[in-house]
């Protein structure tokens, strides 16, 4: 829908929303992607629905990888024309509203959606495709527990049987959530973290795993045959053709995110051969994977928010001096007990520095894990403590933002 | 395995390990190893028989469904009851603490517990989420308890148990007391890796299990810093 066809209330709301976002940016209060949408929705509660109407939309949700997969998917759909997207990771309805208002008229939109809001955003945006990446423990002091989240997704999708679901065959909770849908495109991106799916969400029996396969020992739930599969340094598509996928982003997990994006784009008619070169243009995502040179050190930023994403970060990180930073502020969750769900032993033998509001929790964890470390109180001290060359920085959410601010809000 | 080896069982990590509960097993094993006490750890899944002859049993937190399932399986198995009757030490946390009592609530229904602690649990009006702190029963001779709690239950203590601690911040059982103990069984709402912040409780379990009156002191510099920070933070948020 173009601005000209919007109802008057929506037009006013859109205009005010854009102005507020611009003011917020000008005032240095953030990127404006939340405040603009918040004001717009106050003026017109149907604004997201109005702004979504007439666009072909893909939603991307899951505990981990949604920002990167959204970026990849937007890049892939770019083959077809302009794409609106919430590329700052503002993944609740205010962020979606702001992103669509800011983008103006576009035939396509790719929106990252917080897991808790998926049902509402499906209702309001009537997407063509919903991508379900994974479900694992994350900020348990306030987030819904994993099985409750799977149930919410399952109910939401059952109410919209015409939506195409692109879903991860390797995650039993995702498979169970998607199974009621009529049109499912399964992908396999591997699953390093399995501690949240030992028990079948359907019948409560143990789930067994072997050689990448999994099955419930008590009912018929089992891994579906995926159509899109990561293999070696590339992706096998739904027709069985293998495509070399060269990315700037590191790690096996990002190949999985790329496979997901290709599977979503295919539902819009984009061929992998057209999309793959566009994935290689993505160099960093809101500071994640960004590299900054300072005082002879090449500093790379990796975000790790929960146990599953720490495992992926260790897979990506080079054997190099490593700074770990942990906070437990509101966006991180106040509870640090997840530190014991992460095995830090891959860091043994590396020079490890620790910092952040909750460095003492990390110190006790690393001692038990027999990982030697040194505590530093500032980012500068960390940089000065390591030799020239690569410094890997792995941090949770607000700790990551703090370090990004030290590096002039690198993107 | 020989008779001098300390055997530590982690009960049903497939059902009850929501909040880094593995930490308690790792900390006990390490504190034993640092003192030259050989220790072995066993993770016993809910489809396996419960060993009856281990020295320390650990049970952690979890969601309602798995909690109810764990209670059913432990009652049917009977191994844990035999172990407790033979004098094994137990640390029961959160959902695991509740199911050690006579009854608890899960998914809106009253469930039968293991009846190994004289407690019963129901639902509170609000969820207790945040730092918890308390002064531990002086008979145990331990420094203050610090932990993070996240539970919807309220637990009532019968005459057969004593409170583990008097609450000075947070909720615990009911805003007054936190946890319970009797014999060599300790229960607490200080969830997940509670022993990371309370190494003295880890050492109490090790003393109970080995029969030693005292243990060689360890360098707890980082634990003490963590304790100082969290004891000061409790009650301020």
Image: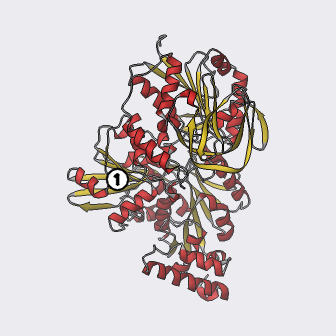
Identify the image quadrant of the C terminus of chain B.
bottom right
What chain does mark 1 sit on? A
Considering only vertical position in the picture, is B97 above or below B207?
A: below
Q: Where residue B100 appears, x then y in whole percent? A: 68, 30
Q: Residues within 10 Å of mark 1 (few under 14, many from 20)?
A: many
Q: Where residue A253 appears, x then y in whole percent? A: 45, 50
Q: Which residue is rendered at x = 55% and y = 27% of the image?
A: B140
Residue under pointer 1: A393
Q: Where residue A346 appears, x then y in whole percent? A: 37, 39
- Residue extending farthest to the front is B138
- Residue extending farthest to the right is B109
Considering only vertical position in the picture, is A265 above or below B85?
A: below
How many numbered callouts? 1
Element type at marker 1? strand
Considering only vertical position in the picture, is A84 above or below B7?
A: below
Classify residue B164 as left or right of residue B65: left
Q: Where residue A42 appears, x then y in whole percent? A: 64, 78
Q: Which residue is rendered at x = 60% and y = 75% of the image?
A: A55
């Amino acid at each position: 829908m173009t601005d000209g066809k919007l109802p008057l209330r929506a037009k006013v709301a859109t205009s005010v929303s854009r102005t507020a976002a611009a003011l917020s940016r000008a005032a240095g209060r953030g990127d404006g992607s939340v405040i603009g949408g918040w004001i717009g929705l106050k003026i017109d509660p149907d604004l997201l629905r109005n702004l979504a109407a007439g666009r072909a939309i893909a939603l991307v949700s899951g505990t981990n990888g949604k920002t990167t997969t959204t970026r990849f998917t937007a890049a892939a759909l770019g083959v077809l024309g302009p794409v609106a997207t919430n590329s700052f990771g503002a993944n609740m309805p205010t962020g979606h509203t702001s992103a669509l208002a800011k983008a103006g008229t576009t035939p396509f939109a790719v929106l990252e959606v917080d897991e808790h809001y998926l049902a509402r955003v499906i209702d309001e945006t009537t997407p063509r495709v919903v991508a379900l990446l994974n479900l694992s423990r994350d900020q348990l002091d306030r987030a819904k527990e994993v099985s409750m989240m799977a149930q919410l997704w399952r109910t939401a999708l059952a109410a919209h049987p015409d939506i195409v679901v692109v879903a991860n065959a390797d995650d039993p909770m995702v498979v169970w959530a998607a199974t009621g849908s009529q049109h499912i495109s399964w992908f396999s991106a591997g699953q390093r973290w399995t501690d949240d799916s030992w028990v079948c969400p359907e019948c409560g029996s143990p789930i067994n795993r072997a050689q990448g396969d999994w099955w419930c020992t008590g009912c018929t739930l089992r891994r579906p045959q995926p159509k899109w599969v990561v293999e070696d340094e590339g992706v096998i598509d739904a027709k069985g053709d293998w495509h070399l996928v060269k990315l700037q982003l590191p790690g096996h997990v990002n190949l999985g995110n790329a496979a997901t994006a290709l599977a979503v784009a295919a539902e819009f008619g984009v061929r992998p051969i057209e999309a793959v070169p566009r994935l290689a243009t993505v160099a960093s995502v809101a500071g994640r994977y960004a590299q900054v040179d300072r005082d002879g050190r090449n500093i790379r930023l990796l975000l790790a928010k929960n146990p599953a994403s720490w495992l992926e970060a260790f897979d990506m990180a080079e054997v190099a001096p490593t700074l770990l930073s942990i906070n437990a502020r509101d966006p991180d969750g106040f509870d640090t007990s997840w530190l014991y769900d992460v095995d830090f032993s891959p860091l043994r033998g590396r020079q490890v520095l620790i910092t952040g509001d909750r460095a003492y929790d990390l110190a006790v964890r690393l001692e038990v894990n027999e990982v030697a470390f040194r505590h530093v109180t500032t980012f500068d001290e960390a940089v000065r403590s390591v030799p020239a060359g690569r410094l890997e920085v792995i941090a949770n959410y607000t700790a990551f933002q703090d370090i990004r601010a030290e590096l002039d809000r690198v993107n | 395995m020989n008779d001098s080896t300390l055997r530590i069982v982690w009960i049903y990590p497939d059902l009850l390990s929501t909040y880094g509960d593995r930490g308690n097993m790792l900390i006990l094993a390490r504190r034993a190893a640092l003192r030259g006490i050989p220790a072995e750890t066993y993770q016993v899944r809910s489809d396996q028989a419960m060993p009856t002859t281990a020295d320390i049993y650990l049970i952690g937190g979890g969601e309602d469904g798995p909690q109810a399932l764990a209670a059913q399986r432990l009652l049917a198995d009977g191994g844990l009851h035999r172990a407790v009757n033979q004098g094994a030490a137990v640390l029961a946390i959160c959902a695991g603490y509740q199911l050690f009592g006579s009854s608890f609530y899960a998914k809106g229904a009253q469930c039968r517990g293991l009846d190994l602690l004289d407690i019963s649990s129901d639902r509170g009006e609000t969820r207790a989420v945040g730092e918890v702190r308390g002064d531990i029963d002086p008979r145990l001779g331990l420094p203050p308890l610090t932990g993070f709690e996240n539970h919807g239950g309220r637990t009532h203590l019968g005459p057969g148990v004593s409170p583990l601690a008097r609450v000075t911040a947070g909720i615990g059982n009911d805003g007054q007391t936190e946890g319970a103990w009797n014999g060599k069984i300790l229960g607490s709402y200080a969830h997940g890796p509670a022993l990371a912040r309370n190494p003295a409780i880890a050492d109490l379990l090790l003393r109970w299990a080995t029969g030693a009156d005292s243990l060689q002191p360890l360098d707890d510099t980082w634990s003490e810093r963590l304790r100082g920070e969290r004891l000061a933070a409790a009650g301020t948020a």
